[in-house]
Amino acid sequence: MFSCQHSGFLCTTDHLNKVILAPWVPVVGLEIHAQITSNSKLFSGSQVQFAAPPNSLVSFFDASLPGTLPVLNRRCVEAAVMTGLALNCTINKKSLFDRKHYFYADLPAGYQITQQRVPIAVNGSLSYSLCIDNKMSQMVTKTVRIKQIQLEQDSGKSLHDDARSQTLVDLNRAGVGLMEVVMEPDMCCGEEAAAAVRELQLILQTLGSSQAIMAEGQLRVDANVSVHHPGEPYGVRTEVKNINSIRFLTKAVDYEIQRQIKELENGGTVVNETRAFDSKLGCTVPMRDKEGKQDYRFMPEPNLPPLILYDAKSLPANVNHQQVVNIDWIHERLPDLPSVKRAKLVELYGILPEHSFTLVNEDGLMEFFEDVVKRTQMKPKKVIGWILSDLLSHLKQHSLTANESPISSFLLADLLNLLENGDISSSAAKQVFEELWKGEGKTPLEIVKEKQLELIQDQEELEQICQAVIDEREKEVMAIKEGNKKVINKLIGLVRKATRGRANPLLVKQILEKKLSE
Amino acid sequence: MESLGVAAKWRRPGVRCGAGTGREDGRSGVRRRGVGRHAARFSAPAALKEGQITPTELCQRCLALVRSTQFLNAYITVAEETALKQAEESEKRYQRGQPLGELDGIPIAVKDNFNTAGIETTCASNMLKGYISPYNATVVQKLLDQGAVLLGKTNLDEFAMGSGSTDGVFGPVRNPWSYSRQYKEKSIPRSDSEPENSNWVIAGGSSGGSAAAVSAFTCFAALGSDTGGSTRNPAAHCGVVGLKPTYGLISRHGLIPLVNSMDVPGILTRCVDDAAVVLGSLAGHDPKDSTTVQDIFQPFALPTLTDVSKLSIGIPKEYHVPGLSSEILAVWSKAADLFKNAGAKVVEVSLPHTHYSIVCYHVLCTAEVASNMARFDGLEYGHRSDMSKSTESMYAATRREGFSDVVRGRILSGNYFLLKQNYEDYFVKAQKVRRLIANDFVKVFGSGIDILLTPITLSDAIPYVEFIKEDNRTRSTQDDILTQAANMAGLPAVNVPTALSERGLPIGLQFIGRSFQEKQLLTVAKWFEKQVQFPMIQLEEVKKHDDGVLQHQKSASFS
């Protein structure tokens, strides 16, 4: 529907199957809330758990009982530092907490504790890659600047029962730690936004700082979208909320860009508003309860002293290590980030960069691939073909992840070993793969036996079959003898048919050539 | 006591005053003890340890006094049943010879803005009427853990916003001194048309209930809170010791906040030694309050100072404010002379930014109030209006019904100061001024001054009918002027009852110390306390309000 050129300036829009060059520059910035993976909440000891019974994980502080005070969770601070380092941020040795005020049923205190003035991490960047055609063969790497990462509290959840005009409030989520990652408006279309978010998601999952599952609300993306003519100041922006998958992010951003362009080209104006993405209709609509200007009346949080972080240099002597967070210590222990993993895959297995991209980006696929490689004599370069064209396409068809695959890495490795040992032909291997996909608990060997798919190892038997084919096909034999060598392939095909794919084509060719030259 | 001109006079050293319980006749009598015999600190523990009185007897006696002084309106809730149970437990410990410490079996009272599990916590507001907290404030828990007996919750201005203890939904607190022989003898007889008790004076505030409770002998110690002077002001008016410790020394967890960055739990007792005991039981880091200091606090017993010649006492000239009564001024200079004559160095010092503190406090206080009060929306706890048109209309009606005009007024101003367009002009400026005020103290203490000596109130307590002629804001502004700067700077400060005014009412003076130097501060306060021999309240009215049931105990206590 919509894609960007490399320059990031002029955009071609494929609208109603008509490609037009629009003199508009779309600008997309993202605000991403990632729920921190931690045992307890940001400022209280309540447990963090998805889908627990309503209001079962609520401390006195979470319910804002008068007189309760926040106590900062060290784990959440470490997760934010880790994330900041992974996103090339400057970690602020001193950051501050603020109160952001607004009345809402699922915000018990009437304010959210956040980091408005001095956040924990600033000035970072995120590199992400995306393909510029659908064939995955041309990839381009882009960078989006990270303005800041701030620690803040999540709100509870409101459930509006319009029929009974009631609002039900669940405070289980209230106070869970969030990292808000603010990206500068360096993107220009839905695909870029989606690729950036996917890369961030991978980084968070690699770090373990957030599970970052969008469907469970652990990663929430708000997109700021505007359009302007080249050389002119940025246009009025809208904020698009309610985006709960990466696919919808692409759609929502592209829809919003188109809507704004259409609005402006029809002589209208874009108003600064919050819009919600309606995934059923595939469009954005104004959010009624976000109408009107909010003044959040920010104020320093008086109950939390400044958050002080240390590095190896500034770490005071005789300090209790449980009491401090050491940035250098965390830095040294960062795991390999996705970009490093991809480079290592290319180097280690000799696979193509775009293949490494797919391996890392698809949930669990890299681990699956490496497991298979470990258990088979087949070269990784050949294994990758099976992983990407056979396994992945099956997984996609059934909307499964590698971890949910009915064919385990063990079974696939067994199958590839049979193929590699010359026990079965590659066409037989595909047949076995299909059988394995059914998940009936059979091993590849059992299937091969049952379906009699093993290659005919008996030379004599093969020679007899070849002879029978030669005897039947006088016309073809004549053609070959007259010099039309290609016709031999037809004979090979016939032998294969006769053996139901159980003949080794190379061997068959040898036998046929020998017999025909006699 | 006879009237001796404008300035109040010290009582002669050696004259017994103060209060305590001690065994007199081998049965249940309690006699007063002199300050000079207070060296053992709480005199009650000694009696308890010696078995002269049991915790249950002590508790019952205090509960009887609570009842007979009900007209003071010092208590909002009296927790008779739980108090007696706690006393019983304490009694068992004494019987086993294993009391928990000096506070075991000691009846105490707690201001009604501290959470107490199972006992109503109202903040004297319709918003929290009937609210029963599921947890104890850390300070309450610490007192209970040391065996103290919690008699009840004391009256205050709504959400501690006030300086008279006159602005709560449960009505004003009456100063026990209104009913003292000392006051009655001095007060000009009113005309016959006026009701007899119309000239009772205010207790000061906002911890007026706690101050009155201690002053009227209903308990041995009480917790107050101090944000701009709320512990020291009523202590001064009620003639008791009122300590505001250094910010961060005592946990605020469970104290329903007024201004988080200035609130400190306050301690009200009848003598300085008792304040030190209670401080020792409360101070120290609390993992539930991130603003408490990490350092381990060592409880201390106060030494008896004999030589003050090494002391340097600062007299800040800015505390000579317009409106300071000549009587207070005289008491203040007399106190300075007392130190000088005893060999201390007494120096006039300057805290040049002091007079900005009121306006600065107004901005910072209302801003935090606006924020802190946002949680009272009727959803999770507290009052909820019947209005059900929409969530927003329910919020609005709940807050209109639940908060007084004073509270709503502060919320409104606070929100105004926090608006984006005003934030820099008000809040940020006020914070800068606060820093200047705090730096004034740093400079003075850096110049070698140990303790500052200042007045604490502009005058003695005034009659309620006079007090309510001005609104809450005006009164708070006038009354906080001498106490507030210590909160801005987070410094420890204590009221020491010093003399009686011409009208027979208490006058107190304030000592301000260096951060976390409570021991030095209280040591000096103790020396001063001993010098001035503040007279004990003669509570005849207590007898009058007693139905005769407690006649024996009463006469024993307050003869």
Image (cartoon, rainbow, N blue to C red):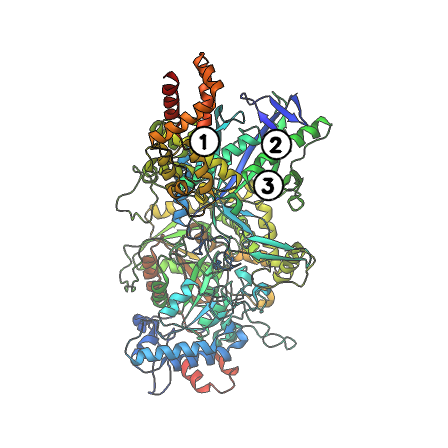
How far is the residue under mark 1 from the one under mark 2?
A: 55 Å
Label whose residue precedes the other's in the sequence (2 or 3)? 3
Residue at horizontal 53 percent and vertical 30 percent from the top? A192
Specify whether A141 is left or right of B106: right
Q: B144 or A114: which is nearer to us? A: A114
Instruction: Answer with the quarter of the image where residue B521 lies.
Output: bottom left
Q: A368 or A478: which is nearer to us? A: A478
State the residue position of label 1.
Answer: A498
Q: Which mark is residue B192?
A: none
Above or below, comparing residue B430 to residue B404 in the picture: above
- Element type at marker 2? helix
State the residue position of label 2.
Answer: A254
Q: Where residue A418 appears, x then y in whole percent?
A: 36, 36
Kind of residue indicated by mark 2: Asp
Identify the residue at the far top of this view: A482
Residue under disc 2 on the same chain as residue under disc 3: yes
Above or below, comparing residue B213 to residue A395 in the picture: below
Crowd band around label 1 with a 10 angstrom C-alpha radius: few (<14), some (14–19), many (20+): some
Q: Which mark is residue A241?
A: 3
Q: Where residue B461 appears, x then y in whole percent?
A: 52, 65
Q: Quadrant of the N terminus of chain A?
A: top right
**Circle 1/circle 2 CB separation < 8 Å:** no
Residue at horizontal 59 percent and vertical 63 percent from the top? B127
Whether residue B4 can be seen here: no
Residue at horizontal 51 percent and vertical 44 percent from the top? B430
